Image (spheres, rainbow, N blue to C red):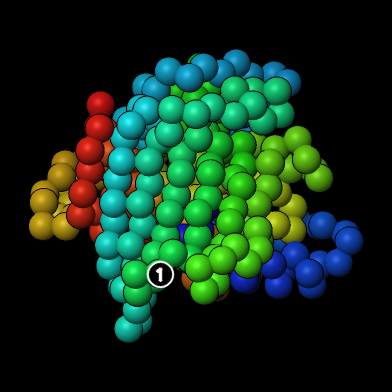
Amino acid sequence: MRSTVAAGLLVSLAASASGCAKSQPAPCFPVTVPEDVCDPERASFGLASTNPYYPLTVGLRVVLEGSDGDETVRIEREVLPDTEVVAGVETHVLEHREYVDGELVEVARNFYVEATDGTVCYFGEDVDNYRDGQVADHAGSWRAGENGARPGIIMPAAPQPGDAYYQENAPGVAEDQGEVQGYGTETIGGQSYDDVLTILDGNPLDGCDELEPKKYVPGIGEAADVEAVLVEVSGAP
């Protein structure tokens, strides 16, 4: 889910350093939201999309642009008509494409589904990392139900300040966390939005060295991070 190849490399290095024993490092935030709501053996799910902060409406396309140092960044996210069964659960497929200085560096197929209470659960991602126009590796890929991975929570049903949870739950591969900061009016990409939700992301695999705020707009979803902001949206519910 982290949006740069550098982040993927950090995850890969952390996984290698851990060896075969995929013990979970100390969390960035004490967990307050249990992951049981996304347990494929205990929870119920559906393809309906009701969570305004992480809509899974087929055809929703969001484009963010910005910079990372002296490099330009473009991120394209689209909910595809495809579905994928992961850990026995049918999920939506959200395709994430990232470009740096106009060159494609990552394509990820993310697997999301809503639990019946409105929590949006994250069941994994298939990642293609590109170098010089060719697929170089698949670092950062994981699926719930494989190699000890479990579904994470990408968006609580009713986010409250202080809520903290694992977004990704693949030991040694992807263990990102989120902590809800609060709501407010924000100007994003020159447009003012009300009820914008801020979530602070942390990665225990890199020692929680960089905590990154992300902004979520009702009906749109992720609209800003530390590198890029919303410049285009279509197909919004």
Q: Nearer the viewer, residue 90 or 177?
A: 90
Q: Nearer the viewer, residue 177 or 18?
A: 18
Which residue of the protein is positioned furthest toward the bottom in this rendering? 70
Instruction: Say above or below: 59 vs 27.
Output: above
Q: Which residue is drawn at 38% across and 41% down?
A: 78
Quarter occupied by residue 70: bottom left
Q: Residue at x 64, y 26 (%)?
A: 85
Residue 82 appears left or right of 57 = right
Q: Nearer the viewer, residue 32 or 201?
A: 201
Residue 171 appears left or right of 116 = right
Q: Position of residue 188 (x, y in %)?
A: 18, 55
Q: What residue type is labelled 1?
A: Glu
Quarter occupied by residue 27: bottom right
Question: Label 1 neighbourhood size at 10 Å, few (<14), some (14-19), many (20+)?
Answer: some
| Residue with the mark numbered 1 | 103
Q: In which quarter of the image is the C terminus?
A: top left
Q: Where is residue 189 in the image (x, y as percent from the top left)?
A: 16, 57
Q: Residue at x 46, y 39 (%)?
A: 94
Q: Where is residue 38 in the image (x, y as percent from the top left)?
A: 61, 29
Residue 179 appears left or right of 24 = left
Q: Residue at x 24, y 53 (%)?
A: 230
